Image (cartoon, grey):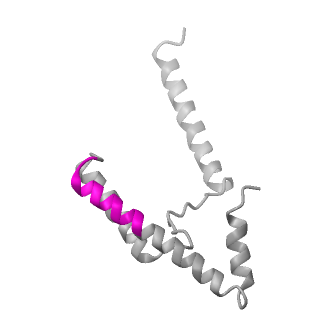
Amino acid sequence: MFGHFGALFVENAWSVFKQRLHVLDVQYVPAKVFRSVKSKPIWMSHKALAAVKHRHKVHTKYKDNDHPACRKADKATSRTVRDSRRHFENMLALKIKEDKKSFYAYARSKTKS
């Protein structure tokens, strides 16, 4: 119907529409800022965090849960994480008289409802 000139008209109209849409998008749509800061749980010590990172590194390297290095990293990490959580909870319990707020905030975070 329009031939070659019709295709040029459509392409030109599309580029003008796309440009206007982009300008309006930048002007009126707020940009959401994504923060990729992964914070550790409050009970996790830096030593436990390092052990977890090491375990991930070992698993990435060997990709086999039965490899001796993976088993060793799993065992060490489990022990460190368990000890870290136990130490944090014991310190909360010992300081409950002076710092009730932290204790109840942690206890409340463990409930399902």
* Residue drawn at 58 percent across, 62 percent down: 33
Residue in front for this viewpoint, 109 or 34: 109
Residue 74: % across, % down: 34, 58
Q: Residue furthest right?
A: 113
* Residue drawn at 61 percent across, 57 percent down: 31
Classify 108 as above or below 92. Answer: above
Residue 110: % across, % down: 67, 63
Q: Is residue 87 visible?
A: yes
Quarter the N terminus occupies: top right
Quadrant of the rendered image containing residue 89? bottom right
User: Magenta segment: does it hold 76?
Assistant: yes
* Residue drawn at 72 percent across, 60 percent down: 111
Residue in front for this viewpoint, 2 or 25: 25
- Tell me: 90 left or right of 36: right
Classify 3 as above or below 48. Answer: above
Over which residues does the magenta segment extend?
Answer: 66-79
Residue in front for this viewpoint, 82 or 52: 82
Q: How many marks?
A: 0
* Residue drawn at 53 percent across, 25 percent down: 9
Q: Residue furthest top?
A: 1
Q: Is residue 44 visible?
A: no
Quadrant of the rendered image containing residue 105? bottom right
Quadrant of the rendered image containing residue 113? bottom right
- Tell me: 111 left or right of 5: right
Magenta stretch secondary structure, dominant: helix
Classify 109 as above or below 26. Answer: below
Residue 63: % across, % down: 27, 46
User: Magenta segment: does it hold 46?
Assistant: no
